[in-house]
Image (cartoon, grey):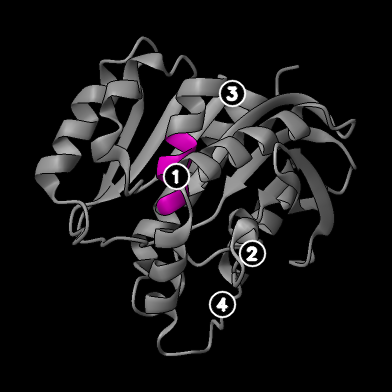
Amino acid sequence: MSTDGELFEVPTSAGAMPAYRWLPAQGQGPGVVLVQEIFGVSTYIRRRAADLAEAGFVVLVPQLYWRLPRNDLDESDPAVLEQAMSLAGQLEWADATSDTGAALSALRADPAVNGRVGLLGFCYGGGVAFQVAAEDSPDALVSYYGSALPGLLDLAESITCPSLHHFGTADAYIPMEQVALIRRAVTAAPVPAQFETYDGAGHAFDNPAPAFHHPEASALAWPRTLEFLSGHLHAT
């Protein structure tokens, strides 16, 4: 499966947002909006989109930095983390969530989608997906170490779809005390969440970059993600 994806335009209040779409081999399937980390639509995010398509999903990845005048990142630059944090800091949170909601609407309307539609977000995207799930009622939500979740827990009771959350126990950005608060909030929601933790894994443990990757945690979390999405999205 190619990691390139096909260019796909999503209508928004500010114009057409560029996005990328992957189709499964059969050309149709349930839909997943994949929401980026702070590194944008990176090689890693494209690889995960291709993985989802190989598993039978129609995948749409919005380019959330499209509104910024300079939105490109050099993944080979040693300073890419600083560049990515700068871009994320420039993007208005309301724009990120509304654009992701627009992507969800576009995917629901896509003729290639013949099942339900869910959200999957990593890090920055995990928080964005969480808020959009509270506002736009997808059929499933998967959030990997959503960095904004500690400030969004008042939305947990508004999430009415099944959800799955992944966190590492050695996350330097989200201490275990906050992870415990997140667990309490999401498992008490009207539709209780599946909550998984991974011993020794840090933040962004699924990202293959050596600074982040925790192979054992990634190898456990991804099959759980596919099983969860398959179980909740394949029914028409």
Question: Compared to 205, does 159 lie above or below?
Answer: above
Our reading of the magenta stretch's main secondary structure is helix
Tell which of 224 and 117 is nearer to you.
117
Instruction: List the residue tagged with mark 3.
Output: 138
Of the two numbered discs 2 and 1 on the same chain, state the one appearing first in sequence: 2
Q: Residue at coordinates 48% horizontally, 39% vertically from top-left?
A: 94
Disc number lying in front (1 or 4): 1
Calculate the distance from the C-alpha at mark 4 to the C-alpha at mark 3.
Answer: 30 Å
Q: Amino acid at mark 1?
A: Trp
Of the two numbered discs 2 and 4 on the same chain, state the one appearing first in sequence: 2
Q: Amino acid at mark 2?
A: Arg
Left or right, residue 220 beside residue 120: left
Disc number lying in front (2 or 4): 4
Q: Tell me the tag on residue 93.
A: 1
Calculate the distance from the C-alpha at mark 3 to the C-alpha at mark 2.
Answer: 23 Å
Q: Tell me the tag on residue 163.
A: none
Calculate the distance from the C-alpha at mark 2 to the C-alpha at mark 1.
Answer: 25 Å
Q: Circle 2 sits in a helix, a strand or a loop, which is it?
A: helix
Left or right, residue 86 beside residue 25: left
Calculate the distance from the C-alpha at mark 1 to the C-alpha at mark 4.
Answer: 19 Å
* Residue located farthest toward the top when viewing the structure as drawn: 190
Instruction: Point out the stretch of residues depicted in magenta.
Output: 124-130
Instruction: List the residue tagged with mark 2.
Output: 47
Instruction: List the residue tagged with mark 4.
Output: 73
x and y, in percent, of residue 117 in the image: 67, 28
Of the two numbered discs 3 and 2 on the same chain, state the one appearing first in sequence: 2
x and y, in percent, of residue 137 in the image: 55, 19
Can residue 9 be found in the magenta stretch? no
